Amino acid sequence: MAHQVDTYGGLLQQIHNDLRIQHPEWIQQNGESPMCDSYEARLTELLFASMPVESNDNIAFPDRELSKR
């Protein structure tokens, strides 16, 4: 079943829930899941790395010529 996610926080929550549904064997008796936590952390890193970032080159170094890069 596909779910519509409207926010980044909603996406993270959906990933959290789906990992636990798909891999109940990763859940410890106390409810913790180091394996799920590891997957979530790695996916969060990948999502963050794929987000576009605005360049601050002209703000940080206003006198630097762009052609020297």
Image (cartoon, rainbow, N blue to C red):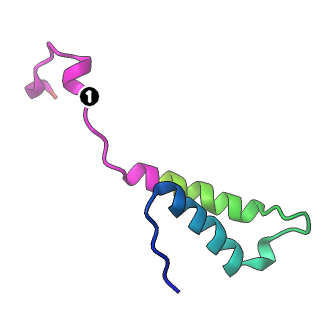
**Quick one: label 1, few (<14), some, or many (20+) residues within 10 Å?**
few
* Residue depicted at 18% across the width and 23% down the height: 58
- Image side of residue 55 versus residue 27, left or right: left
On screen, residue 23 above or below 10: below
* Residue depicted at 14% across the width and 12% down the height: 63
The image position of residue 60, as x and y in percent, is 26, 18
What is the quadrant of residue 55 in the picture?
top left
What is the quadrant of residue 19 in the picture?
bottom right
On screen, residue 56 above or below 61: below
On screen, residue 25 above or below 57: below
Q: Is residue 66 magenta?
A: yes
The image position of residue 6, as x and y in percent, is 43, 63
Q: Residue furthest right?
A: 29
Q: Is residue 29 magenta?
A: no
Q: Which segment is the magenta one? A: 47-68
68 vs 13, nearest the viewer: 13
The residue beneath circle 1 is 56
- The three-letter amino acid code for the residue at tag 1 is Asn
